[in-house]
Amino acid sequence: MYSSEESPLLEGDRIHIPDELNSVYSRFSKTQKNVVVLTVSFAGLLPMFVTGTFVPSIPQIAHDLGSTGAAVSLAVSLSVFANAIGGLVWAAYSSFYGRRPMYLWGMPILCIGSFGVAASTSLGWLLFWRFVQAFGCAGGVSVGAAAIGDIYRVEQRGTAIGTFFGACLLGVTLSPIAGGAAAYYWSWRSLQWSLGLWGLIEMIFIYLFLPETSYSHSGGIRQLTTPFNFVWINPFSSIWLLRSPNIMAVTLANTSAMVTEYVLLIPIAYTIGARYHISNEALIGACFLPSGVGNFIASPIAGRLSDVMIEKWKARREGIRVPEDRLRAALVGGLLVPLSVCLSGLTTMYIAGPSGLVLNLLCFFMNGIGMEFVLTPIGSYNVDVLQSRSAEVIAAVTAFRAIILAPVTAAVLPSIETLGLVATNGVATMIAILGYGLIVLTIRYGDRMRAWVDVGYTVMD
């Protein structure tokens, strides 16, 4: 039998879901599932606000602490690193103790960190408390995506995770505006106190409304340890999942997309702000809005489209499901990622005045849409192929991405100063094109790649 896009390369390597496992998806009613999505989405918003509100406040923080913008910007890289480490810890323990306890343990740490940031009197203390703050909320995305994977079938999962990502990414839209407005009209310290208060409210909300969603992947419902006994789990063991060629390929692909967003948004005060004479922190924060709106609009659409691709190609193969079909949704909008970052660099360099600003904002919107057409199908795909370790694989991907993005964050401004804006955006464009190519290769050779290394892929029917 010859191989084609309508037949898996390795017939014995198909992914199947046993019928007895399907019963776990009927534990919750539609309303209960909606409440779970709503609750974890609000928890997922917090990491976005912790990061996004900080960037527009950097000049004011630097002035208040008697430091420099470059030095204070280290807190951004440090929070990315803390998110990576924290995500691994919360994900690893969520696979043992369940999803709900991780939220109830993490939120107090977030609150303490937020209050510490607000009270910081030196750069050293600011960096320390930023690490604590980011660590506490680091499980918001990985544990939230895993909780949704626990309760939705494969054919519905992309839509649900897309909705979750879209809701979380409201933070990308709103947090820079909130951070800029707070810096200009209020105080960056007051904003940090507010984040701590939000964490307290979120903890109460989770305690009241979030049920335990995890279950035993042998088919039964998970029974939590009673009484509580602490068990040491190596959080870094999740990183070993990245030896899967499939997981590594799509991880590199979504990391390449994230690089373009960082290149566009991190230096925005020194690129868009300087070029178009915008000095008001609130207006600089508002320039993040098109990217976030693009994220918010595209995420549920991309999630739904990935579900459609699963069903469409399953029908073409007469009932055979191949998980890489979900990635076909990324081919639709994924090319907007390199296109947007390339056009933005050229526009900023060569088009002055209001026209240049408007075109840049359109590029940010395009980048936001393209980003979600890459990230959402990939996130759902990772949960599909490693359902039993879904939180851990999402955390491992996030950690690896952070290892790459932390130095990228620190290098963007020096690169623009040394190479120039067009050259820096050109490098990001080439990286994004390579990432797109990895998605194409994974779609075409996914079965064969999974056969190279078995990391405990989900057995589905």
Image: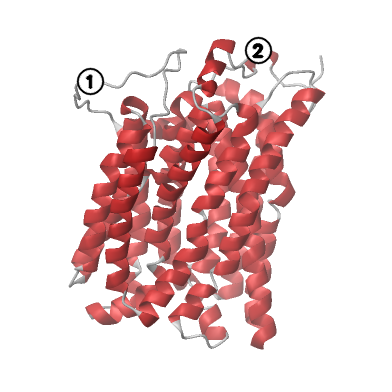
Q: Identity of the amino acid at label 2?
A: Gly
Colour scheme of the rendered structure: secondary structure
Q: Can you see residue 422?
A: yes
Q: Quadrant of residue 317?
A: top right
Residue drawn 28% across the image and 30% down it: 234
Q: Look at the image and tell me in which quarter the N terminus lies.
A: top right
Q: Identity of the amino acid at label 1?
A: Thr
Residue drawn 42% across the image and 28% down it: 213
Find residue 388 and report its horizontal and vertical position in percent: 46, 23
Q: Look at the image and tell me in which quarter the C terminus lies.
A: top right
Q: Does residue 416 sit above or below 433 in this rendering? A: below
Find residue 174 and report its horizontal and vertical position in percent: 49, 65
Q: Quadrant of residue 296?
A: bottom right
Q: Can you see residue 351?
A: no
The residue singled out by tag 2 in the image is 12
Which dot marks residue 226?
A: 1
Residue drawn 28% across the image and 58% down it: 196
In the figure, is residue 397 to the left or right of 4? Answer: left
Q: Of marks 2 and 1, which one's residue comes earlier in the chain?
A: 2
In the figure, is residue 237 to the left or right of 169? Answer: left
Residue drawn 33% across the image and 79% down it: 60
